[in-house]
Image (cartoon, rainbow, N blue to C red):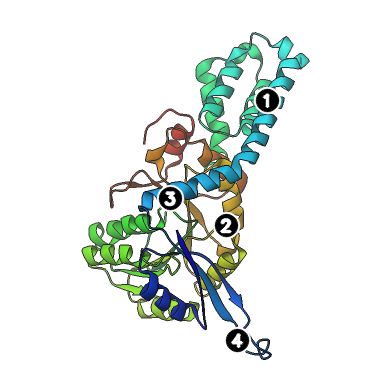
Amino acid sequence: MKIKKYVAPSMREAMHRIKKEMGSDAVIIDSKKVKKKGPLGFFVPRDIEVTVALDGSPRKDFSAARKEMVMNRSMAGEIQELKSLVQQIVTRRDSPEKEEGENNTLLQKFYQRLVDNDIDSRIALEITDEIGKEFPQEDLEEDKMDRVIRDKIARHIKSVEYGGQGQVFCFVGPTGVGKTTTLAKMAASYGVFKKKQVGLITIDTYRIGAVEQLKTYSHLMGLPLEVVMSPQELEEAVERMKHLDLIMIDTAGRSSKNSYQLGELEGFMKVLPQAITFLVLSVTTKGKDLITIAENFKPANYHSFIFTKLDETDAYGNIFNTLYHTSTPVAYLATGQKVPEDLMLAREEHMINLIMGADGK
């Protein structure tokens, strides 16, 4: 892997040099402002230092290596979660309440069902313990238990639907969750099938070749596309497209732990006070990380979630874990890569079925 740093007066100039020297496959892994060298460095505008990586191996190998690095970094947290779960099981086994209700296997069955569907063990325990306290043991039978648990899950599930007329949709989120593909699905739905006038804007400046993907979609659908690199350019592009029915804005994937990138994103969002912003999340992301991402992206002022990659898992408890901790509604669910078929409006009953493991994609 080739790693190189570029220092330039502006991001635009840095991007020009990077693309010229390293090509469109280069990936920006860090960027920050640095003071100019020399005694006058404190009194003049700072330069931008951009760190770029270029991997000679196939893209899938690079992605696998990055995934392995993230997995290793999170192993300590997973071990701690396992210890916590073991302690909970021991506590329940040794408690007098458990001895008195030894034959109450229905609660245990549903507890395990929730955990098997990736609902956080502490939340599953809270739900089943509440039911055990609210209902006499003789009143509990399987169908009733299923309905009661669904009702408790429904309290934390909310969906939302937007009309799309005269609106600005903005898509934010971490890298690799499918923001651009999701935008393309929605653009096709509104622009091709609903015959709306749709304009596309991208401020994806971190992945050198990423703009090409959206250019391809815009060309195939016959939709106008503008590429911007600053909040001022974004504001001007939105003004030029204000006559359209709907404007959709793609953004670069940001690490939820990179304060500089999140601050930069916040700067773009400030010129879009009327935009409806979607935080795009993958259901295959570790549950604790989803909650951290949702918390750290709050400066983007997102209004609802879009969950992607439902086709890559059979357990959807991560959706519930995230909604339980954030109380944020869900707008769409993405079930694959096909444009525009693999995108559906989030319906509360359908999400409950998925979370309970009682429905397919």
**In this rendering, is residue 348 above or below 133?**
below
Q: Cα distance, mark 1 to mark 4?
A: 55 Å
Q: Cα distance, mark 2 to mark 3?
A: 18 Å
Q: Residues within 10 Å of mark 3 (few under 14, many from 20)?
A: few
The residue shown at (62%, 30%) is: 121
Q: Where does the image place residue 272, in percent across and percent down from the top left?
A: 49, 72
Q: Cα distance, mark 1 to mark 2?
A: 30 Å
Look at mark 4 in the image and give the residue it sits on. 45
Q: Nearer the viewer, mark 1 or mark 4?
A: 4
Look at mark 1 in the image and give the residue it sits on. 86
Q: Is residue 99 left or right of residue 82?
A: right
Question: In the depicted view, which residue is nearer to us: 37 or 169?
Answer: 37
Q: Is residue 44 visible?
A: yes
Look at mark 2 in the image and give the residue it sits on. 256
**In this rendering, is residue 339 above or below 315?**
below
The tag earlier along the polypeptide, 1 or 2, is: 1
Q: Residues within 10 Å of mark 2 (few under 14, many from 20)?
A: many
Q: Residue furthest top?
A: 103
**Mark 2: secondary structure:** loop
Callout 2 amino acid: Ser
**In this rendering, is residue 86 above or below 203?**
above
Look at mark 3 in the image and give the residue it sits on. 63
Q: Cα distance, mark 4 to mark 2?
A: 27 Å
Question: In the depicted view, which residue is nearer to us: 301 or 69?
Answer: 69
Which label is found at residue 12? none
Q: Is residue 339 left or right of residue 256?
A: left
Q: Are marks 1 and 4 in contact (CB under 8 Å)?
A: no
Callout 1 amino acid: Val
Q: Is residue 158 visible?
A: no
Question: In the depicted view, which residue is nearer to us: 208 or 357?
Answer: 208
